[in-house]
Image (spheres, grey):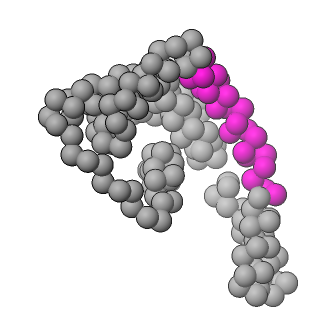
Amino acid sequence: MRRFCLVLMAALLSFACPAAAQTTAPAAPPAASSKDAALKMQLANRFITLIQGEQMGEMMGQMVNSFMDDELEGLSGQEVADYRAAMNEVMRRMMPQLFDAIAPVYADIFTVEELRGLVAFYESDLGRSLIAKSYEAGPRMSEAIQAAMPAILSDMAVVVCDQLKCSAEELREMKAQMRAAPGD
């Protein structure tokens, strides 16, 4: 259960990683009138709807479930099915809360004109196609990333050890730990 909570937190934080990587705070936008603020919230909520939040929740559920495959070993088929159903329900219930939390962020960082442009794009045929294909690509991209991870982690060990002046034994140990990490 502890690992489940950690995996769920990692999945949720993955949406915040690009923002967390910023080294400088963005400039504060000019204060909007209450009329503009209400319009921006309306447009931000429309944007979230258009980017198909329900599918985002399903994708997050699939991602969390895939991280938990090792943890489910030894369970019966029914127990695995029940667990996956519970995870999907957790994600379904959680997504509206997440959307309520992120709508003000979109409303704050985008102008009315930008939000209108985003809404117009995602209402277009091209925008709808982008969304559909992005979710279709998700599982394939996850597989590609998983396949690339051993080489990436090995390279990471070399770079870290070069920087820290590790011995050959320390490098071998770090590579071994990195190989073991994905399936912990």
Residue lying at 24% horizontally and 27% vertically, measured from the top left? 39
Front residue of this view, candidates 101 and 30:
30
- Picture quadrant of residue 112: top left
Compare residues 114 and 61 and report the one nearer the observer.
Answer: 114
Q: Nearer the viewer, residue 158 or 27?
A: 27
User: Is 111 left or right of 163, judged from the image as shown?
Assistant: left
Q: Position of residue 162 (x, y in %)?
A: 78, 81
Q: Please tell me which residue is depicted at 47% across the width and 65% down the height of the picture.
A: 23
Question: Which secondary structure class fits the magenta region best?
Answer: helix
Depicted 145 relative to depicted 38: above or below: below
Q: Is residue 91 magenta?
A: no
> Please, which residue is most extreme toward the top here?
125
Q: Is residue 127 visible in the rendered structure shown here?
A: yes
Q: In the image, residue 14 lies at what x, y percent?
A: 51, 48
Q: Residue at x 80, y 65 (%)?
A: 154
Q: Quadrant of the C terminus?
A: bottom right
The one of 169 and 104 positioned closer to us in this rendering? 104
Q: Position of residue 35 (x, y in %)?
A: 16, 29
| Image: magenta residue range | 129-151
